[in-house]
Amino acid sequence: DTGVTQSPTHLIKTRGQQVTLRCSPISGHKSVSWYQQVLGQGPQFIFQYYEKEERGRGNFPDRFSARQFPNYSSELNVNALLLGDSALYLCASSYGTSNQPQHFGDGTRLSIL
Amino acid sequence: QKEVEQNSGPLSVPEGAIASLNCTYSDRGSQSFFWYRQYSGKSPELIMSIYSNGDKEDGRFTAQLNKASQYVSLLIRDSQPSDSATYLCAVSAGGTSYGKLTFGQGTILTVHP
């Protein structure tokens, strides 16, 4: 089975720009979650989507938004990029219930200049 | 108090020894507990999940959960150099928290020959 796929793998942007990251879940998984991981820390929860609806939001500013499509793939958008947004952005998918393990993609490494 | 705390590292063990990784959490309503392994520059990889008190064994890995003490641990028997990585403890509150995983800061494990 194909795992969680994310694109692009690397991205370099400048302050003030906007970025869109993409994620395709494991086949059969209906839930997608997004996490931000800065160097030396554990991942921080940004959003969770299930059946195209937002089911959870972490402590991130409104510059961060996301959506899920009918095929369960997802996009994470970040506007007005700041230097502090430089991080590894991880997408994780699960079948759906809160107790189900989440499986991560390889991530998108975002660098802000 | 951090929501999820892991024993401070780095942890260094000789090849063949038992590595013990510990994690405490603050939310008594937490229902699901996971251990992820993350190699440098890679994304987290799920290695164990545990939901009820007691031990759960999978190969060389044993996860232990004590909800009364709000404590979860991971034992790695017969440690190998390939086990050298950062180990992340993740906790899910379940219920309306859906897919939000709260991670600890990670413990760096080095297994030396």
Image (cartoon, rainbow, N blue to C red):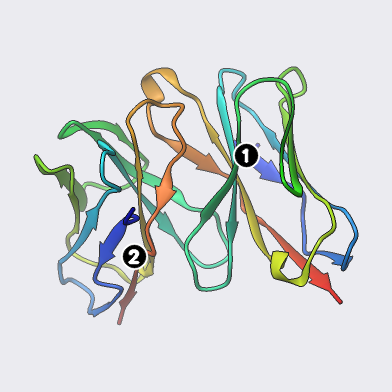
Residue at (75%, 63%) from the top-left corner? B109
Q: Nearer the viewer, residue B28 or B72?
A: B72
Task: Name the image quarter holding residue B38.
Answer: bottom right
Q: Is residue A21 above or below residue A45?
A: below
Judge if badges 2 and 1 mark residues of a common chain: no
Mark 2 element type: helix
Residue at (52%, 68%) from the top-left corner? A39
Residue at (10%, 43%) from the top-left corner? A69
Q: What crowding class fits label 1: few (fewer than 14 Cα within 10 Å), some (14-19), or many (20 or more)?
A: many
Mark 1 element type: strand
Please identify the quadrant where the C terminus of chain A is shown. bottom left
Along the horizontal axis of the image, is A74 left or right of B102? left
Disc 1 marks a residue whose amino acid type is Val
Q: Which residue is mark 2?
A: A85
Query: x and y percent of residue B113 in the render?
Result: 86, 77
Disc 2 marks a residue whose amino acid type is Asp
Query: x and y percent of residue B46 in the render?
Result: 54, 49
Q: Nearer the viewer, residue B83 or A63?
A: B83
Query: x and y percent of residue B100 in the render?
Result: 41, 35
Residue B4 image label: 1
Residue at (56%, 23%) from the top-left corner? B30
Q: Is residue B77 above or below residue B39?
A: above
Chain at tag 1: B
- In whole angstroms, how far apart are the C-alphas of marks 2 and 1? 23 Å
Q: Nearer the viewer, residue B60 or A113?
A: B60
Task: Name the image quarter holding residue A5.
Answer: bottom left
Task: Name the image quarter holding residue B85.
Answer: bottom right
